[in-house]
Image (cartoon, rainbow, N blue to C red):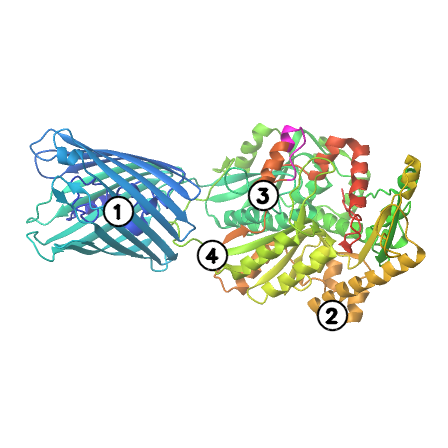
Amino acid sequence: MRTSAIAVACALLCASSAALAGPPAEDPRPVAIPWTFAPEQRGVESLLHHAAGLGYMSSLEVGLGVTTRLDGDAPVNSVVGLAGGRLGPLALALGVSSIGDGPGTDTATTRVDLGFALRLGDHAALGAAWHGLSNDADAALDDYDSWSLSLDLRPFRALAVALAVDRLDTPELGETSLDPVARLAIGLRPATERITIGIEAARTLGDDALWTAGGSVRFLLIPGLVLGGYGRYVFAESGPSPDRVEAGAFLGLYQGGVSLESSVDLADSDAAQDSRMSFLLAARSVGEPSLTHRTDVVVKLPIRGPIPERPAQRLFGPAASGFAQWLQYLDILADDPDVRGVVLQIEAAPTWAQMWELRRAMQRLKDHGKRIHAVLTIGDMRAMYLASIADKLHLHRAGGLFLTGLATTRTYYFGLMEKLGIKAEIVRYEEYKSTPEMLTQAGPSEASKEADRALLDGIWKEWRGAVTAGRALTDGDIDRLLEGGPQTMHVAVKERLVDDLIDDDAISEAVEQDLPGAHVVDSYRPAPRAWKRWGGQRRIAILPVVGSIVDGKSGGALPIPILGGETTGDASFVPALQAAAADASVVGIVVRVSSGGGSAIASDKMHRALTLAAKKKPVVVSFGDIAASGGYYLAAGAPKILCTPVTITGSIGIFSGKADLSGLYGLLGLATSTERTNERADMMQSHRPWTDHERELAQVALKAYYDRFVNVVAEGRGLDLEAAYAVAHGRVWLGPDALDRKLVDDYGGLWDAIERVRAEAGVAASEPLSLDYVGTLGAFSSFQRLMAGALGFSEPAGALGGDADAASASALGPVGTQAEALSARLRVLSDGGPLALLPYTFSIE
């Protein structure tokens, strides 16, 4: 089919009748390349006729063009070499041409073109180009140079407009001044990126105006094969220039980043024009829809720990991929007919919520007929939870499984603080708000143990259900195997926990045995099947709330002990949310919460901004691993809240206090002296404890913040006040319990939230949407990581990195890690403000 289409296209091209490549500028030595239509230009060839198109080219492009006369005595008219590149919005290109001086001559003119472009987002680009000639035999040509200015507008998917003025500086050719030429071209794409219809006009801006008017069509017959044609009429308002008709045909062949374009350009028999055939061979760093592409592909997906929920801008280049882009990529693979499956190479497991969402994505792939293979080296409980979704589960031949059950451990610092003479002065609401217990007592309260047990049991139930279903085991099998764990590689195979043992170099062979004819690839970019959309894609804005919620600006995770820890600040979140709500290109907003809370005031400001944004466009909140206390506070007013069955949420409560260091001062021999205007002026200072009366006053003051929190929940979730207080008390809830108590609306992950926003915005499933993280960290975060690496500290959590806590632990050791944790907990009390904070850092391994 493709071979026949190409043969027909070549026949049509050779049989066509037409004129010059591009509207005639009447330049002394124009460069003829295959016909181009200004609104479509997006490559290095734009330098010659419409420099604004350089703004859309790839990061690096080169081209070689040749034009041959179809009549006359001289066979070769011109040769041109082009090179250009784009870095961000700025583009630069250079062209050097050798142009024959005409029939009966053996001389040539050298032409140099230099162009610049500034890209203004997805919708516009501004370009300028300089053209100069050099000819030893003709002084007039040797002195000639000119400037052109161009503008490209792509406001909508179906419309592009190109404006240009050539010979802007009215250049001199000998004794003659050449008039500027104004150009206008309009491109239309009728609901598809496979056909472009063009209308164009040009006029010289002088007394003897020369007009050009015409139309064109270009269409993508099949991926990699483009056909087109144009026709135009050239006439003069006055003067001796004869009217003429021009027409031409175009053929383009594309494979990956390499293209071969050609056109035949002919004039009517009375015109003083030569007929030409032009060719342009170009290479670019980004591929086009191609004649052939890889099929029967199985894609490797390395999983190396938590995937960024808030990707920072790189110091150089675009931002790293966030979790939303991972899920979008998996959805694209599910719909791609060239993909037959994926291989999950699990080196370290992500967070529990991310694994639940990845399992959902894997199930979508399976529902589309794809096969899932997973490879483990040392598989722990979390890795097994993710890997059990696979159709085939492989274990490294020298590996094993560490399946022994789930546990969570808390550390209490009260005894250490007593020895150091440090006392935590705390008030809280209410009994389940157990953060202070780590600082005020030597072990957990009954309320704390009850909440912990419920979380552990809920996640255990989810894990066991997933693994028994995935590996065709019974609950009894699981209990027996975990009691006998860890499991060697031989036990793992015998007990059907894995399918086989495998070496790294045999993975491809194992996949190909399961999927005959398949090819395992390390990376894969789906083959484009249409041209790039004009005007860019509409967007869904994703606002991540990660780490502690703080007053002020957000901060990045710096993997240096004591100084690390991601934060989300109201001064960063609120403006980003307001900008997204006001941006016409944003169809909806997803707020992704992976936070245990923090400042109650910052959480309240963020809650207010979210409530107002939801009045302007669809807003859905997605809960990750933890969305508790202040993390729940800010989300409570959202129209829709989704969580996973392993999400920890709730913790509707509050606490405040200070660190009393008077005992430590005594141990160190320090003395203090305080002068005050009022009795409680130094109430929040660390040199003395609270009096009983001050503690009562602090409790009363904190009650107002607690009541505010509960009222926000009641109003946002449509609960009566009594029901809201009943689910409060600082109690944390796992996803199923939160759903039962109407704290969330439904189960779902980040991708479900994205799809719900799409549906509520009325965007068709077939329309591609860009997923853009907003309110993320700038390039300084990458500089922090760079410096941390230079100092010998590990990279924080990333798509291909490890866990930030693990990095800190490796740097400090276990004792140092606990000291850092104690320091962090005392720091949160430093300003005495109300805190809507998760009672603890909860980790289940």
The 10 Å Cα crowd at callout 3, few under 14, some 14 to 19, many 20 or more, is many
The crowding category of the residue bearing disc 2, from other C-alpha atoms within 10 Å (few below 14, some 14 to 19, many at least 20), is some
Q: Position of residue 723 (x, y in %)?
A: 79, 69
Left or right? Give the position of 72 relative to 506: left
- The Cα–Cα distance between marks 3 and 4, rounded to whole angstroms, is 22 Å
Q: Which residue is mark 2?
A: 719
The amino acid at mark 1 is Thr
The residue that disc 3 covers is 312
Report the Cα–Cα distance between label 2 and label 3: 38 Å
Question: As rendered, which of 363 and 260 lies closer to the eye?
Answer: 260
Q: In the rendered image, which residue does mark 4 sit on?
A: 538
Q: Quadrant of the C terminus?
A: top right
The span from disc 2 to disc 4 (Cα, nearest Å) is 36 Å
Measure how far apart labels 1 and 3 are at the Cα level.
Answer: 39 Å
Circle nearer the N terminus (2, 4) = 4
The residue segment tinted magenta is: 788-797
- Residue denoted by label 1: 36
Mark 1 crowdedness (10 Å alpha carbons): few <14, some 14-19, many ≥20:
many
Q: Which amino acid, by three-letter code, is at mark 3?
A: Ala
Q: Amino acid at mark 2?
A: Leu
The answer to if 791 sits in the magenta stretch is yes
